[in-house]
Image (tube, rainbow, N blue to C red):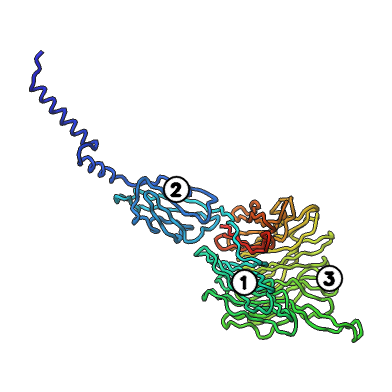
Amino acid sequence: MRINSEVLSFKGSLTLTLLSVLVSACGGGAGSGDSNTANLSDAIAPTVLSTDPASLSRNVAARTPISVTFSESMDPGSLTARTFVVSAGGVPIAGTVSVAGSAATFTPAVDLDLNTLYTVSVTTGVKDSAGNAMATAYNWQFTPGTRLWSAARAMATDAFSPQTGTDGAGNIILVWQQKEGNNYSIWANRYDSGARQWGLATLLQTDNTGSGYVPKLAVNASGHAVAAWQHYDGNRYHVWVNHYDAVLGQWGAVQAITGNASDAFDPQVAISANGNAIVVWRGQDGPFDDPATSLTAPEYYASSLWAKHYTAATNTWDAVPVALEMDNDKGHDVGAAQLAMDSLGNGLVVWQQFNGTVTSVYATRYIVGSGWAVAGSISTASAGVATDPQIAVDGSGNAIAVWRQYDANARYSVWASRYVAATLAWGIPVVIENDNSGDAFAPQLAVNSAGDAWVVWHQHDGATYNIGSNRYTVNVGWSSAALIEANDTGNAMHARVAVNANGDAFAVWEQAEEARTSVWSNRYDPSLQAWRMAALVEMDDNGDAHAPQINVDSTGNASAAWRQWDGARWKVLTSRYQ
């Protein structure tokens, strides 16, 4: 058969031409195909593949970076806090944005608030590396809620009696008593929430001729603080104080605010929003002649309650202390004084005192511009002995006091009374727990700015001590008492409680286990209006842990401090819940 060469030539040429077009379209060839492929890729807008936290996540850690992964590498210059926005309630929060290839991360400047809905928006201003913008904005939401206790940090060795306080920005001040040679000194340290680290320890008491014991601390929202402690100079006990200036970022000079006429013990301190402060203490007055005997009979001493006021504007304490009660009869001693101040600088003090018939809880108030009022009993004398009062104030100057009192059931119960600032009057005392299986001890309370209160105590159930609690809600009243721990392997005792404005409350206590005593905690979740599960704060099995203290800042971070035996010496340790 003869083949037409002209036809074959035409068909071959057509085939090669078509193949060339197809190869070129598919990206083949030496150069032009690469260009065509890049142009096709450049036309594709980036999309979001995944986020962390995932959309609608709950119980997200408060200190968490927010990240998003795109479908391709991104232009770092297009991803900023204006195009990668994290907000709560429509208000953007501060933070920084970093980009690595196709991933971008927003790191908040501060810890996120618990139980708050956050919205994340990636806007159409975000571009890929070729300059193509997001076609539509991408939004998602999440809610922080889970935080963990950090590993315990040793702050000092041969140290005791830690006390902590926090300001409105989450900075923490810690004070403690520390053995140095034959004496004890008072030390302090400060946690910087911005830098997220502790500073260097500062010696508050520089007099090495005596010893300082059992410091107390008050910190206001601005970060100013006052520390007070009892100091023994070899002859008498005095009350010493020191002031921390948050503006200068330093402690001042130590100062004795009691004289040499008599001993002074057990100082307590409170500070107001404007930096004014009050210190109260128990003074040993006398000697007095006993009227029931002859003039030659032995004389006696009486414990009375005294106070001094600090004025921040002049950085001065009152020159002369004020006696808050004048009952110097034999045996009519005062004890267990506690105080609190409101935002205006008014103060409230409670204490226990025997009046010749029964030990009752007494109270007095300091009114700015007027001074101290006459003291009076706020407990029900007919109910029985009342001891161990505690007090806290809210943002309007109202207060709640709690105490333990022997009642008709032949046991100690927890009682409470509320002070109304508008009427300058205390309400009728009420019992806030009704478990008659055993006595209740050592009530503690915290009140937030709205006036809601959280109370904790330890109580015997006939076999072990457990931690009980109750809550007061403004315009509602007290709820029912309930346990916040149920570990019956050992006694749970000496609870402390703290709360912030949002109602994030924390309780800590010491709990005996099989081999040693540990520090435990529980958190009150305001979104659930309930306490969560008890959790172990520290896991050091070398020795017992005692005297835990607790604070919580405005974002729901908590700080605990306690003393612990390491097998050779006592140390002060801290841990952060964040």
Quadrant for the N terminus in the image: top left
495 shown above or below 27: below
Q: Residues within 10 Å of mark 1 (few under 14, many from 20)?
A: many
User: Is there CB contact under 8 Å for labels 2 and 3?
Assistant: no
The residue that appears at 71% across and 82% down in the rendered structure is 322
Report which residue position mark 3 lands on: 358
Report which residue position mark 1 lands on: 187
Q: Which of 495/197 is in front?
A: 197
Q: Residues within 10 Å of mark 2 (few under 14, many from 20)?
A: some
Q: Secondary structure at mark 3?
A: loop
The percent coordinates of residue 323 (x first, y second) are 73, 81
The residue that appears at 42% across and 53% down in the rendered structure is 105
Between tags 2 and 3, which lies in front? 2
The residue that appears at 63% across and 59% down in the rendered structure is 506
Residue extending farthest to the top is 1
Between tags 3 and 1, which lies in front? 1
Residue 51 - label: 2
Amino acid identity at mark 1: Trp
Residue 212 - label: none
The percent coordinates of residue 216 (x first, y second) are 66, 71
User: Does residue 423 appear anywhere in the picture?
Assistant: no
Q: Which of 526/572 is in front?
A: 572
Amino acid identity at mark 3: Val
